Amino acid sequence: MGLAAAWLASAATGALPGAVAAGAEASYPPPVQSDFLLKDFRFASGESLPELRIHYRTFGTPRADAHGVVHNAVIILHGTGGSGASLVRAEFAGELFAAGQPLDAAKYFIVLPDGIGHGNSSKPSDGLHARFPHYGYRDMVEAQYRLLTEGLHVSHARLVMGTSMGGMHTWLWGELHPEFMDALMPLASLPTQISGRNRAWRRVIIDAIRNDPAWQGGEYSSEPPSLRTALEMLWLVSSNPVLRQDEAPTLARADQALDAYVNDQMRSADANDLLYAVSASQDYDPGPALEKIEAPLIAVNSADDLINPPELKILEREIQRVPHGRAVVIPFSERTRGHGSHTVAVLWKRHLEDLLKAPER
């Protein structure tokens, strides 16, 4: 599943009432996977790569009008540490891409890119380690945009949506390319720069890795011990306290649950990749340009999200500056999964259905 799948999308265990059962993937076609190569890609930092690889998955077929403009494209962006693969799961794709569902793959051309530094796209662990260019969210959006326009020849999208980091990318898409899409749906995100507790847990991870002598400036031969600390922090913030208490009701059970998660993630996690991914949010600040968003937008958060807690009232305040924006906060229930609620589509897909009533622009 990848780091984000285990961290943010399925942080809690157990069956979800109302979710699509295992095997639901049979009701939508398998994705087609490919790579798009961007030559001499220049990052906002001034660094560059002679070749940047963006891996992606697609469902469905693009349909163009008489002028060659595709109108059925949907771009869905994943969370920190994950990839498009983390969205190809029953509780997300099964609820959205299957026949008769809001993003029926027989109707839409769905694109799931792996962000820079993630999945099978170019990343530090490919070999450059800490010499890999320091990328930010705006670099990631630029690569996504070029994948769509240059690689897939899509100049317009029916919908841009994303989960967590992908939700933050969605806000930036609306500002940087306001005419590109008909609608926007950021999930589990806030339209303001990273600050407060959200910045603090990221700093814990960044400092743990960078200050670990075993990190060796990124040139380690085996994963540094600080990676375990980083993964423990991810476990801490990913779910809600009620689910965590149910999962770990005693000291021994808590240790067992934490150890099991960390040991599982250590099989595929890489310290440099995680360090870069968590650091990439440094340039995220959509706040000053929210009025530039033209498309209808529905932002969805959950009341038990420890990363974007509703008591901050940031979403409710800032959404008033979005010309056609609306904010939804899903109440806490036995079905919510803290920050990971963003991948449990049954919780919020009716709002997606409402959003898709917006006319094409």
Image (cartoon, rainbow, N blue to C red):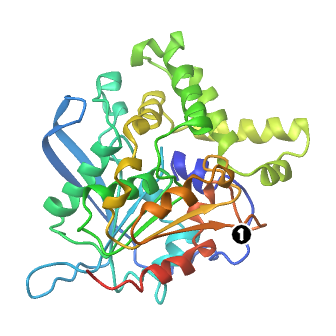
In the depicted structure, whether residue 335 falls above or below residue 188: below
Residue 64 placement, left or right of 306: left
SS category of the residue bearing label 1: loop
Q: Nearer the viewer, residue 112 or 360?
A: 360
Write the residue at 49% across / 62% down.
319
Crowding at dot 1, Cα within 10 Å, few <14 / some 14-19 / many 20+, comes out as some
The spot of residue 82 in percent (x, y) is 47, 49
Name the spot of residue 287 as percent of width and height, x first: 41, 49
User: Where residue 197 appears, x then y in whole percent?
Assistant: 62, 36
For residue 205, what is the image quadrant? top right
Q: Residue at x 46, y 83 (%)?
A: 102
Q: Is residue 205 above or below residue 174?
A: above
Q: Which residue lies furthest to the top in this view?
A: 213
Which quadrant: the C terminus? Answer: bottom left
Residue 332 picture location, percent across and down: 74, 64
How many numbered callouts?
1
Q: Which quarter of the picture shows residue 10?
A: bottom right
The three-letter amino acid code for the residue at tag 1 is: Leu
12 vs 358, left or right, is right
Q: Nearer the viewer, residue 200 or 317?
A: 317
Residue 115 against residue 124 in the figure, above or below:
below
**Farthest residue toward the left?**
67
Tell me: 280 left or right of 256.
left
Foreground residue, 174 or 109? 174
Q: Which residue is drawn at 23% across and 35% down?
A: 44
- Residue beneath disc 1: 16
Task: Determine the residue positioned at 35% across, 60% down.
Answer: 291
- Residue pushed farthest right? 250
